[in-house]
Amino acid sequence: MPLFSVPKEVAVGTAMLGVAFATGMLAGKKYPSLGFGTPKSSKSIIGKSSPLWQYILDHSLREHPILKKLRLLTADHPWSKMMVSCDQAQLMANLVKLIKAKKVIEIGVFTGYNTLNMALVLPDNGRVIACDINEDYVKIGKPLWKEAGVEHKIDLRIKPAIQTLDELLASGEAESFDFAFIDADKESCNEYYEKCLRLIKKGGIIAIDNVSTAVTVVVAQGVTAFASGKGKKSHSGILVMSFLTCKWVANCNTFVPCYTKEAFKIQHKFLKQAIQNTDISKE
Ligand SMILES: C[S@@+](CC[C@H](N)C(=O)[O-])C[C@H]1O[C@@H](n2cnc3c(N)ncnc32)[C@H](O)[C@@H]1O
């Protein structure tokens, strides 16, 4: 019996993600002192000293023009490092499309780059529950949501994300979401993860950013429980994927992965298990 069943494309996509992790091709991360965030401005990611990186972006990035506009607009923000990288966002958009998601949650919106990214690939009646506490950040991207014609798909909730998740659960939306991206304060990550496990339905995906910092343990527990089949009932059938931390290398203008051995082992084990247990017979 497979532990879970995901579409073949998702398994392949996830495997490629694993390869990207293994080869250090994914976007790097830098953690400002607040404990969240990633170095994502085009200025820092597309570095001249990283021809491989540039090649990957030149040949695989298909960024919507308004997304690009928002990325460049955000690049000038003092906290631009918090924005997801364009390739990371593209991977999530592809996964959202592959599982034919209709309802997604973004925990931590910042200027709304990934919110817009997901809204663009959702069907017209799709919905992004976008959670943030800082309206000033969100205000930067909101006009571009409108310009892209997807504003109606975005349900922005300005309040602590825990409160929003509780409200969703209280209003009977458990097991009704397809995808969640956890990318806010790390202190609450454990709670976000547990609540998302209740909100995401079977066949859905929970993506967690910056897992090799404070949340490694959370993910490790979830992934281990999930991969061994010993997780709670509600864990089964949900794919948990994680974006690992990379370390900013000063004066290098590029990012190199800085995996903790443990985080890499967990990721690798999980991906291997995910592929082995993918039920492609129904495809
Ligand atoms: C790393 S940024 C999110 C980046 C975003 N996902 C993107 O695609 O660009 C983290 C965001 O989490 C928000 N945040 C921090 N604590 C929060 C909380 N308790 N509830 C909701 N949002 C929170 C911050 O205001 C910030 O905008």
Image (cartoon, rainbow, N blue to C red):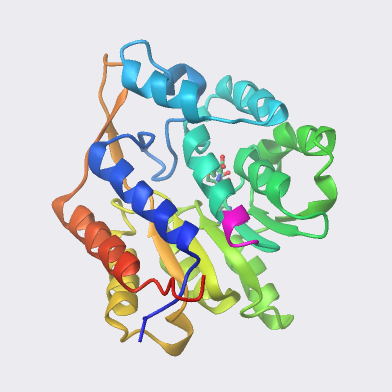
Point out residue 181 in the picture as x, y percentages from the top left corner. Answer: 53, 56
Residue 175 appears at what percent x and percent y? 61, 79
Asked if the magenta segment contains residue 165, the reply would be: no
Q: Is residue 250 above or below residue 248?
A: above
Magenta portion: prevailing SS class: helix
Q: Quadrant of residue 256?
A: top left
Q: What quarter of the picture does the N terminus occupy?
A: bottom left
Residue at the image position 59 percent from the left and 47 percent from the top = 93
Q: Position of residue 85 (x, y in %)?
A: 48, 34
Magenta part of the protein: which range? 96-100
Can residue 218 be seen by looking at this rendering?
no
Identify the residue at image location x=41%, y=42%. 34
**Residue toward you, 280 or 264:** 280
Q: Is residue 242 left or right of residue 64?
A: left
Give left or right: position of 273 versus 47.
left
Q: Nearer the viewer, residue 9 or 147?
A: 9
Marker count (numbered)? 0
Which residue is at a point 41% across and 68% down the rendered structure image?
A: 190
Q: Is residue 236 visible?
A: yes
Q: Nearer the viewer, residue 60 or 281?
A: 281
Q: Can you give x and y, in whole percent of width and height, for residue 149 in the image?
A: 84, 40
Residue found farthest to the top: 48
Residue name at image x 77 percent, y 33 percent: 144
